[in-house]
Amino acid sequence: MAKRFDISKIDFDLLCREFAKAKRKNLMLTELEELIQMRLDEMLKVNPQRINYYERYQKIIEEYNKEQDRANIEKVFMELMDLANSMDEEEQRYVREGFTSDEKLSLYDMLFNENLSKEDIKKIKSVAVELLAKIKSKIAELDHWTEKQETKAQVDTLIGDILWAELPDSYPDQVIFTYRQRIYEYVYMRYKVMA
């Protein structure tokens, strides 16, 4: 049943009013849980840095499973509604950050750290856009890139070359190695069927 709905199109005010009138609140709660779980799965595929939304969801569900009285069901429903609203905001964050796609935001999130200057943040945004374009271009010219060690190494090397050349000096070599591996794993999982 949940597969028919797109949670981003749900009118949450209407849903809250319906929930207030519902006799079987736990059934509505279960349906909302399923919708949020599906949406979280999609969000994490696009951007693994969004794990905090999944952790928040898990905490809400754990609390619900401890005690399922009427007051707790209503509290959990409202917490899930709040989570869904914040997920809406997160899915639009790429626009606020000045990107044209969630993919670019994903690379930016992987490269971001709290100690960056405004200038470094601008640089990281530029690196994320350039990196994604070059990765996609390289993958497009390779035949079944994930099936051969040589072609996988070409993509990995490209990522490393761009990161070492373009990241601000504030990024130590060990951090760049970590980011390179993280981005390669993301690209491998996300674009393995591209070719």
Image (spheres, helix red, strand yellow):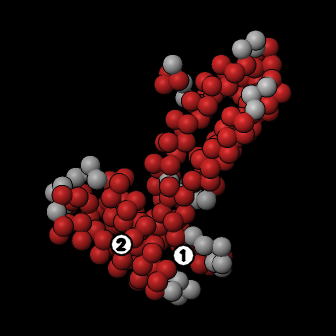
Label at residue 159: 2
Rendered image quadrant of residue 67: top right
Q: Compared to 177, does 69 lie above or below?
A: above
Q: Which residue shows up at 41% across the image and 83% down it? A: 165
Q: Which residue is mark 1?
A: 123
Residue at 17% x, 69% y: name it.
Answer: 150
Q: Position of residue 70 (x, y in %)?
A: 80, 23
Disc 2 residue type (three-letter): Ile
Q: Amino acid at mark 1?
A: Lys
Callout 2 secondary element:
helix
Q: Nearer the viewer, mark 2 or mark 1?
A: 2
Give the SS element for disc 1: helix
Nearest to the observer: residue 16 or residue 22:
22
Measured from the top left, where is residue 169 in percent x and y? 53, 88
Residue 93 image point, x, y percent = 62, 52
Q: Is residue 92 visible?
A: no
On the image, the x and y values in percent for residue 35 come to: 57, 30
